Structure formats: C-alpha cells, structure tokens
Image (cartoon, grey):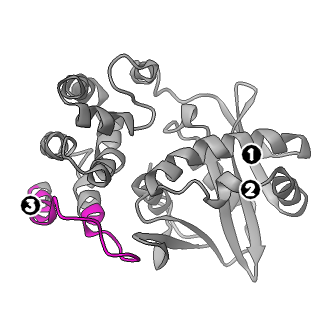
Amino acid sequence: MNVAQAIAAAERILPGGAAPDGDVDPRWQAIIAVGAFIETEPEPVWRFVLRWGAYDDADLRAAVATCLLEHLLQHHAATYRPLADAAARADARFADTLRQCWPFEPPGGAAGDALSPNAGSSPSCEIVDAEPADAEAILAVQRRAYESEARRYHNWKIPPLVETLDSVREHLEQHVVLKAVVDGRLAGSVRGVVTDGVCEVCRFSVDPALQRRGIGAALLVEIERRFPDVEAFELFTGDRSAENLRLYERHGYRRFKAEPVSPGVSLVFLRKHAGAPQEPA
C-alpha cells in the first residue's frame, strides 16, 4: 500500500462514526495506516491532516492529533509547524487538534519552544537501578507521562495513574525497577516482573518534557539486558497508542492478541522472544 491508497481507504471510511461498544474503531485504524507514511510522504499526509483536523467530531480530531499531526510535527517541524500554527489561528477546531499534540500547543503557548533547533538533541542519560528513595519521583513522572494516555482514552482511572506510593515501594522491593537519570533528575522508569520464564515489561514511562529523545528506547534495551535467561518479554498498550506500538515493534516486539477492556478500546499485547533482533533506530 502506498500513501495515496492509504488516504483513499481512509476517505472511504471518514467521517463515519464511533465504533460499536467493544469494537476496534476502523476510523482510528485507517488513520494509523496513513501515519505509516509520515516520514517519507509528509505532504499528502499534511493535506489529509488539514482537512480532517478541523472536522466537527472530537474523537476524529483526537485520532488525527495523536496518530498523525503529533508525529508530522516531530519529524518535519521546520516545514509543518508554521503551517499548523496558521491553520490553528484560522480555525478553532484545528487549534484544538493541535493542542492535543504533546508537547505542542496552539500559537502563543510556551510549548512551542519544544521545536527549537536544539530541542531534539539527545540529553546525557544514565540507566541505573532505582532505589527506595526514588519511589515518589517515579510515581510523579509516571502520572505525568500517562496523562496523555488518559486523555486519549477518556479514562482517568488507568492503573498507572491510580497506583499508590505503597505499590511502587513494593515493586522496588520485589522486582527489577530501572530509572533514567538526566542532568541529575529522574526522567523515566520501567519495571520487569518475571513469571514462568516470561518477563513482563510494565509501568514504562518517560517524563513528557523529555520524550522523543531516545530515553524510552534506552530503558527498554536495558530492562531486556537485565534478564538474559528468560524465554520472552511481553508488554501491552492501548490500540490507539500508535507511537508506543511503533517503538515496541521497532525493538522486535510482535502483536499476539488484543483484548477489549471498555467500549471501543482494546489492549494490544506484544511479545518478543529473547534474542530476537530489533530494527535499526
């Protein structure tokens, strides 16, 4: 499939309507398919974003924001940020779409500084074992990191947001918990829990202010390195979390099941056999 075919397939579905309760939303899946061409064919993707990013359907705009516009600005900021700003000034609905793209905000928002020439440079990052004294910082970063997921799924009771400090401390005592440290402060964390030869990679989080700089990939690589004797690694994410899915699949994880968890939302489970190759970054 090429970009024209992906867009044509999406146009046949859109604007459509929300999927029935418990079903995967075909609109989101079609938009994710268009997103596969963001890096190589940004111009037709931008035209698609410009059209549907201003449509009078909040859920559809959320899909355009999180699956397309956010990543278009990530990879082609110099070209498309000025165009997105202009579109936001001209249309309030497009401004709402732009506002949903972490860390971008409509014109006048301080988050625009995130697109400065030096913003994408990789910080000095150290991955080390977390300590009991890190529990509060881990929970604070985790909650900030999962706020975007809560907005995406319209659910503020997802486990990473409602986890207690005692639960974090218990994991620190019983399992491997790694932290990413950038400029002396905790920037992210991940946990590994082994059951019957399989390591579950869980509570994977990076401070939103430091995302898209390789910290998540570094955490993922290191947690796998800590478990050389397991048979496989498993993790899960929501079916609308396109960026998470791309990261995991680049690192060799493959989808093996999906489970509905609420109306219109499913969890996608991915597995990586120990020693499986990953795609180059």
Q: Marks 3/1: CA distance?
A: 43 Å
Element under disc 1: helix
Q: Closer to us: mark 3 or mark 1?
A: 1
Residue that numbered label 2 is attached to: 163
Residue 68 position within the rendered picture, expressed as x and y whole percent measured from the top left: 29, 47
Magenta residues span 4-29
Residue 118 position within the rendered picture, expressed as x and y whole percent measured from the top left: 46, 19
* Camera sees residue 43: yes
Give above or below for 150 relative to 108. Answer: below
Taking the spot 56% from the left edge, 31% from the top edge, the residue there is 209
Q: Is residue 68 left or right of residue 236?
A: left
Q: Are marks 2 and 3 in contact (CB under 8 Å)?
A: no
Q: Residues within 10 Å of mark 3 (few under 14, many from 20)?
A: some
Q: Are marks 2 and 1 in contact (CB under 8 Å)?
A: yes
Earlier-in-chain disc, 2 versus 3? 3
Residue that numbered label 1 is attached to: 139
* Camera sees residue 188: no
Residue that numbered label 3 is attached to: 8
